[in-house]
Image (cartoon, helix red, strand yellow):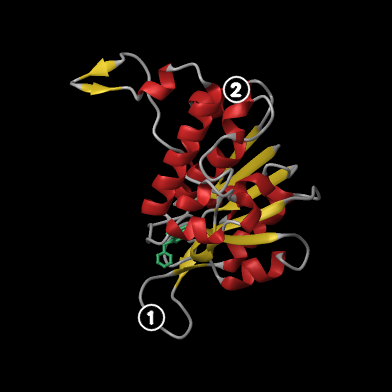
C-alpha cells in the first residue's frame, strides 16, 4: 500500500515513521509520502486560506492550492482520497478493514475551518472520496485524525503485526469490546488473576472471555450490542 499525506504541518506526521509503522515502511509493506501543501503556493506569504463566503468565523482553505497539490501528488495512479472533517462519516474498524484492501490512500489534512467544499466535489468526479470523522469532538486540524486512521489501517496489512490472529480478535472485529486481560504475577496488590484463566480448560476460558466481552459491551457500548445481527448471539449470550 502507498499512503500520501498533504498537510501544512508535515512534522505532525513524523510519528508515522516510528515503531510498528516505521518497521512496516522499512520492510516495504507500506510506502509513505508526506507533502507540504505550501510547496504549491506561489505568493510570498505562501497563503493557503481565505475568508469564508457568506461570512462567519475563521478562514477556509483555498481550492486552487489544494487542486495543484492533489493533482501533483495523485498523478495518474488510482487512489482513494480521504478528507478528515468533524462533519464526516464515522471512521470505524469496518472502515479500516475496507481501506486495508486499497492500493493507495491519499489524505488531505485541513486546518482552519476546513477545506473549500469544491475540492471534495471536484475529485469525487473522478475517484472515491471519503469525508470521515474519528469521533464526536472537534480537533484543530486533520493531522491527528490521519495518525489514527493510518495506524488502524496499516496494522491490518499482512505481515505488519507479529501475530495476525490478534487483528482478527480485535475489539470490534466480532462487534464486541474486548474483555479484561491479565499476565504475571498471579497476585498483585491483593488482586488475583481469575482462576478460570489458569485452569487449562480452553472451552471454559473461551466462554469466560466471551461473557466478559458481552458484559463490558453491554455496560459501555450498548449501541454495539443493538447493532449485532441476530445470528451473532447464541442463547447463552442473550443473558446479557
Ligand atoms: N477527523 C476529524 C475531526 C476533526 C477535524 C478534522 C479536520 C479538520 C480541518 C480543520 N479542522 C478544524 C475545524 C474546526 C471546526 C470546524 C471545522 N474544522 C478539522 C477538524 N475534528 N474532530 C474530528 N473528529
Label 2 SS: loop
Q: Position of residue 160 (x, y in %)?
A: 62, 26
Q: Which mark is residue 56?
A: 1
Rendered residue at 59%/48% (across/down): 234
Give the image location of residue 71, x and y in percent.
71, 55
* Residues packed near mark 1 inside 10 Å, few (<14), some (14 to 19) or many (20 plus): few
Instruction: Measuring from the top left, give residue 37's x and y in whole percent.
Output: 55, 52
Q: Furthest residue to the left?
A: 189
**Which is in the foreground here, disc 2 or disc 1?**
2
Query: Image point 39% across, 33% down: which residue?
Result: 180
Which is nearer the N-term, disc 2 or disc 1? 1
Observer able to see residue 40 = yes
For the residue with label 1, is its CB less than 8 Å from the closest atom of ligand 1?
no
Tell me the residue at 50%/62% (across/down): 85
User: Which residue is at the front of the view, 153 or 192?
Assistant: 192
Where residue 23 sits, quadrant-wise, is: top right
Mark identifier at residue 163: 2
Amino acid at each position: 500500500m502507498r499512503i500520501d499525506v498533504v498537510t501544512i504541518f508535515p512534522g505532525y506526521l513524523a510519528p508515522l515513521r516510528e515503531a510498528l509503522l516505521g518497521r512496516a515502511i522499512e520492510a516495504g509493506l507500506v510506502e509513505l509520502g508526506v507533502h507540504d501543501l505550501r510547496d504549491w503556493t506561489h505568493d510570498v506569504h505562501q497563503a493557503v486560506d481565505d475568508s469564508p463566503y457568506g461570512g462567519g468565523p475563521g478562514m477556509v482553505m483555498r481550492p486552487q492550492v489544494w487542486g495543484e497539490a492533489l493533482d501533483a501528488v495523485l498523478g495518474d495512479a488510482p487512489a482513494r482520497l480521504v478528507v478528515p472533517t468533524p462533519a464526516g462519516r464515522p471512521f470505524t474498524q469496518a472502515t479500516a478493514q475496507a481501506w486495508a484492501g486499497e492500493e493507495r490512500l491519499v489524505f488531505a489534512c485541513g486546518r482552519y475551518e476546513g477545506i473549500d467544499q469544491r475540492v471534495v466535489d471536484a475529485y469525487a468526479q473522478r475517484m472515491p472520496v471519503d469525508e470521515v470523522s474519528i469521533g464526536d469532538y472537534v480537533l484543530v486540524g486533520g493531522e491527528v485524525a490521519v495518525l489514527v486512521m493510518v495506524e488502524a489501517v496499516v496494522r491490518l496489512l499482512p505481515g505488519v503485526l507479529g501475530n495476525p490472529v490478534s487483528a482478527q480478535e480485535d475489539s470490534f472485529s466480532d462487534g464486541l469490546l474486548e474483555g479484561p486481560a491479565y499476565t504475571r504475577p498471579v497476585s498483585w496488590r491483593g488482586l488475583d488473576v481469575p482462576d478460570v484463566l489458569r485452569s487449562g480448560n480452553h472451552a471454559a476460558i473461551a466462554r469466560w472471555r466471551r461473557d466478559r466481552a458481552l458484559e463490558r459491551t453491554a455496560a459501555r457500548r450498548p449501541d454495539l450490542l443493538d447493532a449485532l445481527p441476530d445470528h451473532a448471539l447464541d442463547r447463552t449470550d442473550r443473558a446479557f
